[in-house]
Every structure is written in C-alpha cells, then in structure tokens.
Image: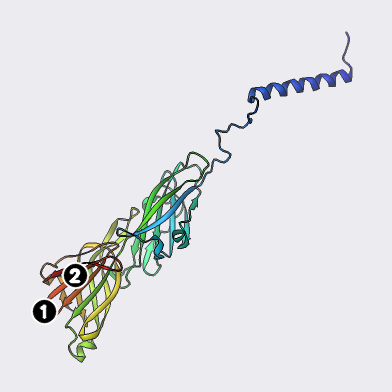
Amino acid sequence: MKTLSSNSKNWFVALFTLVTTIAFTSCGSTEGDSIIDEKIPLSTDVPFYVTLSAYSGDENITSQGRIENAILYVFDENDNYYTQIAVDKSYLLEAKPIAISCPNSKKITVAVWSGIVANKENISSMSKANILSDLVVSVNHENGIAKIQPTDIFYGKAVIYKNATTKAQTQELKIESKVASMAILTRNVAKSDNDANATYMYRIRSTKSSFNANGELTGNDIEFAVPATVGDNGCVVSGTFFIMPSSNVTIELIKNGTTILSSKNFQNTENVSVNAGKKTVVTFDYAKQNSNFYVANWNSVSQIVEVG
C-alpha cells in the first residue's frame, strides 16, 4: 500500500483548513455584511438618564437656585435598594442629565429628597437589605414637641424606563416643595415694660411628623414651638418659619409659659390649614380678638381673607 509523504500531508491539512474557513464564513454573512448581528447592542448596560425640575406649589422654580442639593435613591425593577447619588444645584440650574447605572433592570424607581439637614430631619439609612417602602423622612422632635423647625424640603419620585437602543434619552423627574411656611404677628400684647420683657413663643398643633416613601404625610401628631419676639408697637412676631403641612392646625401664643391666645377662640378660625409650597401670614389682634389671614405664594401675597 502506497503512503503519503510528509509534504503531501501538510498540503492536505492546509487545503482542509482553507475549505472549512470559507464554509463557516459564507454561513455567517453575505457580501458587505458584518459577522456581528447589529440587533445585539455592543453594551447591554445602558444607563438611565434623568433631569430634575423643581416646583413650589404650581410655580416652576428650577432656575431660581432654591435647591442647594439633592439625593437620588435608586431602586431596581423589584423595588430593592440599589444605590444613591448626590448632586448639587448645578444639575437643576443647567438641566444637566444624571446618568444612573442599574444593571439587569429594564426599569428603576428613583426617589429624590432635597433639603434634609441632620439636626432638623432624619432620613432612613439605606442598604442592600432595604426596599422602597423603607425610605422615610421624619422631623426631629422630643416627646412630640419640635423645637427646631424643618428645612425647605423637596421630594419627587418616578419610574424610569430603559431605552430600547443604546441612544441616551433623558426623562424629567419633578420634585415638589413638601413643607409650608408661616409668619405670625399678634398686635396689642406687650403694652407695658413687663410685657415687653416677657418670654413669648407660638405653639402650632397639630401636624404629622413624617413623610413615607411616596412623600405622603404619616407618623404621629406633633407640635412646633416657634420662638417669638416683641417688635414695634407691642407686637409679638415669629418671623417666617417652615412647618409640616396640615389641613387642621391650632395656633397658640404662650407668654411666660401660659397660653394667652388660641386660634380656636376666634370666629371661623378654629382650624387653620397650611399648604405645601405656600406661605400663610397670620395676624391676630389681642385687644379686638380678630384676625387676618394672608394666603400667599412663597414670595408674594396672592389672597387676603378677613376673618372676625
């Protein structure tokens, strides 16, 4: 039997390799096509993108610089906590997109809190063991009394969907003011030197103490102790302060530890509402036992209601 020489074997192996390569190549593509299927993106971890906008009541305040910073809490498609991202005010002023990476999720939920200050509010410490409903913000208080008023808190939440292509698309996430502001003045109180040297404060009851993961008021009822000073013509003034919203608050004026005025004793003012994103200016006249309520936007009076 005749055997192949060494040179013949090498020629046969080379020919077989060439034929096999041509066969596989012709199965994978036609002339002019890439062997990579263009329907499969080169990177499957496409970031989510959001831009923040801010509202106080119905007013868009994004460009006003009122938001100093914000924290984005990111939850995966199963509402499990994934990460958090801190941004400064430039992201609102310049409408800068925020890139959020959350692999293996087709959608995410982003909850945003802004204005949280450690000595005034408490926000849940989040870890991988937490879920969306664990995210809670509470006003710091002791035995139901808050001696420090809350800050200018904003909140927003949205479900963000991943784009089907690798092209980045930004979705807007609106954050809204969650606190109200008030200013209180009482005329004809400090009529003597003893009155002027007394210690005054306003007590506001009752509001809820917390916001849940949806930005809704929750928790126990608390009251706010608001310092007051004696101003011109014997008026006792609070200055402007923030407060948790409520449809039913009672305003009391305390002098040297004794309640000398309650809004419940004024006609039609048994219950006073304070609304998120709005400013309520309340004026009492201690001698005449009547009151004026100014319902305003954050920086300007929009409506005056005479009562009493």
Whether residue 5 is situated above or below residue 219 in the rendered picture: above
For mark 1, does the 10 Å Cα neighbourhood hold few (<14), some (14 to 19), or many (20 or more) residues?
Answer: few
Q: Residue at x 21, y 69 (%)?
A: 294
- All told, the count of numbered labels is 2
**Horizontal placement of 259 versus 38: left or right?**
left
Q: What is the x, y in percent for residue 307?
A: 13, 70
Q: What is the x, y in percent for residue 70?
A: 43, 60
Look at mark 1 in the image and give the residue it sits on. Answer: 288
Residue closest to the eye, 128 or 5: 5
Give SS at disc 1: loop
Give SS at disc 2: strand
Residue closest to the eye, 227 or 218: 227
Look at mark 2 in the image and give the residue it sits on. Answer: 293
**Horizontal placement of 294 versus 172: left or right?**
left
| Quadrant in which residue 241 is drawn | bottom left
Whether residue 129 is situated above or below residue 293 in the rendered picture: above
Whether residue 162 is situated above or below residue 269 in the rendered picture: above
Q: Which mark is residue 134?
A: none
| Quadrant in which residue 145 is drawn | bottom left
What residue type is disc 2 on?
Phe
What residue type is disc 1 on?
Lys
Q: Residue at x 39, y 59 (%)?
A: 113
Q: What is the x, y in percent for residue 208?
A: 26, 62
Mark 2 or mark 1: name the one nearer the start of the chain: 1
Q: Residue furthest bottom?
A: 193
Q: Quarter of the image containing the C terminus?
A: bottom left
Marks 2,1: beta carbons within 8 A = no
Q: What is the x, y in percent for residue 229?
A: 26, 82
Residue closest to the eye, 146 or 39: 39
Q: Residue at x 30, y 58 (%)?
A: 58
**Horizontal placement of 220 versus 165: left or right?**
left
Instruction: Give the Cα distance between marks 2 and 1.
Output: 15 Å
